[in-house]
Image (spheres, rainbow, N blue to C red):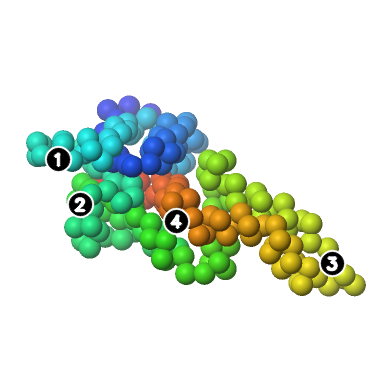
Amino acid sequence: MYYMEPKTLIVVYKDELLVNQLKKLIETKDDGDETAVVGTRDGSVQIVAWTEKVWLEQKKTGNITAKVLFLGDIKGTDKLVPVIDVKFDQYGIKYGWAGNQAVLTADPKGMKSREEYASFVTDLGLLPAPASVKTAIKATESHKISVKKEDGKLNVKGMFSAIGANVADTAKDTFSNKKALVQQMLIFGVINLYNKDLEAFIQA
């Protein structure tokens, strides 16, 4: 069994939803056994959540030895991003680390088209993201079902008029609402980081 003292991960954030999502993933007992670890080993990581303000104050003391994860646009991370070893880079979402500091960023300009956003929304829909973040996804899916086929062929015109009239009002709002889009992107990054690379960062 795994009985080592949990390692501290300081998470610096501006959006509390992001740190709560990461906490939920880390604190969920999702491992099968010693060989079937999901994300980080159950009980091996404890999160200490700091706002950007607390981080900037604590940083002045200069004696932080724990691993630190920056979620989003935190003051000073622009100096860290150029030197990180990038582990993930998709849809304008990027994360990686250098030493004890990891950073997850989201650049809305990386989502270059509505088509790319639609692909992103599909991928996000497969992840355990909060319901509030999936609002645009549910709207998109419910209207996909309502598109009828004519003569056995997909009614493409009908599909686009349905999308134009209904779905994409929600998807468009999210795509053009930078704050909502960045939140979706960062949630996507948080879940991918947990599933694929957080354990490696904690152990590095």
Between marks 2 and 4 in the image, the one whose residue lies nearer the viewer: 4
Does label 2 or label 4 sit earlier along the sequence?
2
The disc placed on residue 149 is 3
In the rendered image, residue 150, in percent from the top left (x then y), is placed at 87, 70
Q: Marks 4 and 3: which is nearer the front?
A: 4
Task: Give the label, 3 or 2, closer to the camera.
Answer: 2
Q: CA distance from mark 1 to mark 2?
A: 11 Å
Look at 73% across and 55% down and name the residue there: 143
Amino acid on which disc 3 is placed: Lys
| Mark 2 burial class by Cα count in 10 Å: few <14, some 14-19, many 20+ | few
Pinpoint residue 103: horizontal percent, then vertical percent: 29, 51
Mark 4 or mark 1: name the one nearer the start of the chain.
Answer: 1
Instruction: Identify the residue position indicated by label 4 in the image.
Output: 178
**Disc ID at residue 76:** 2
Q: Which residue is mark 1?
A: 59
Q: Residues within 10 Å of mark 4 (few under 14, many from 20)?
A: some
166 vs 77, nearest the viewer:
166
Residue 137 drawn at (x, y percent): 61, 52
**Residue 9 seen in the current view:** no
48 w.r.t. 110: above or below = above
- Residue 72 x/y as whole percent: 34, 50
Cα distance between the residues tagged 2 and 4: 21 Å
CA separation in Å, label 4 and label 3 = 35 Å
